Image (cartoon, rainbow, N blue to C red):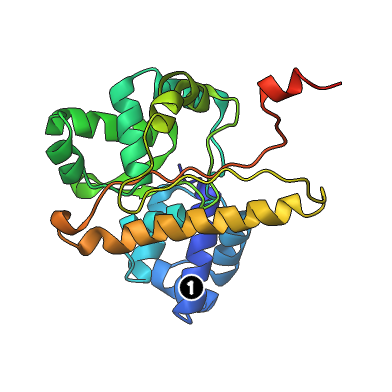
Amino acid sequence: MSTTADLVTALKKELKTAQMTYADLAQALGMAESSVKRMLAKGDMPLSRIDAICRALALDFADLARRVADEQPLLKELTHEQEKAVVADKKLLLMAICVLSQWTLEQVTGYYRLTEAEGIKYLAQLDRIGIIELRPLNRYRLKLAKTFRWRPHGPVMNYFRDHALLDYFAGGFDGPGEGVLLVHGNISRGLAPAFMERMQRVAQDFAQQHLADQKLPDREREGYTLLLAMRSWEFEAFASMRR
């Protein structure tokens, strides 16, 4: 939620963009220029005054609030409690995964057994949790950074370890566009972060391609799950044979 200080900061930017001086604004508001300067310097004023400044700028208050929301820092990770709330309801978890893929409400309800009312309810819950900003007509804006990840040992990853990991690797990985690579080697510890950065770029490329291909008809698209991982690890059966 935007604070008054955030709104005032955004208004200052709008004044600069519109090349409106404090003297111009004071005249439009019927105030002394010194009072306007003091008011904006404090960064605290009633919403009625903010609304009056918006009118002077010919700016809709909703547009101002949206611009402030768009400039809020994006989340790279949820808190433990936020993730716990997501996995508490499997339909909510489904909706969370869908919004991470930028599915529309119509796509979700068309593909899964969710009613429109349920879909709207879960979008509202994700808004309260902080994953999205729900907008008119059930559209939304993701509030997650491109580098977002689930907590390594948080509720969501633990859920997938318990319920999805074995199912994922049970596949043959021999279909069109499928494959699995298992590579082991000893490399410099200093180079490991560079490999992780490359993997993150691959993941981002995959996510961006998903968004770009949304305009294609359904018959030309297929659902894939990309799993990238790297860790310092030794197979337990091998470790037990160490000298």
Neighbour class for label 1 at 10 Å: few (<14), some, many (≥20)?
A: some
Q: Is residue 131 above or below residue 41?
A: above
Q: Residue at x 52, y 69 (%)?
A: 13
**Viewport quadrant of the N terminus:** top left
Q: Is residue 16 above or below residue 50?
A: below
Viewer-proximal residue, 123 or 205? 205
Residue, disc 1: 15
Position of residue 119 measured from the top left corner of the image (x, y, whole percent): 21, 33
Q: Quadrant of residue 191?
A: bottom right
Left or right of residue 153: residue 1: left
Position of residue 41 measured from the top left corner of the image (x, y, whole percent): 63, 60
Q: Residue at x 41, y 67 (%)?
A: 29
| Local secondary structure at mark 1 | helix
Report if residue 63 is visible in the image.
no
Position of residue 124 measured from the top left corner of the image (x, y, whole percent): 30, 33
Viewer-proximal residue, 199 or 75? 199
Q: Residue at x 57, y 43 (%)?
A: 182
Q: Quadrant of residue 167?
A: top left
Viewer-proximal residue, 52 or 106? 106
In the image, what residue type sits under mark 1? Answer: Leu
Viewer-proximal residue, 241 or 54? 241
Report if residue 190 is visible in the image.
yes
**Viewport quadrant of the C terminus:** top right
Q: Residue at x 82, y 51 (%)?
A: 188
User: Of all residues shown, which one is farthest toward the bottom?
Assistant: 19
Position of residue 106 measured from the top left corner of the image (x, y, whole percent): 15, 44
**Callout count:** 1
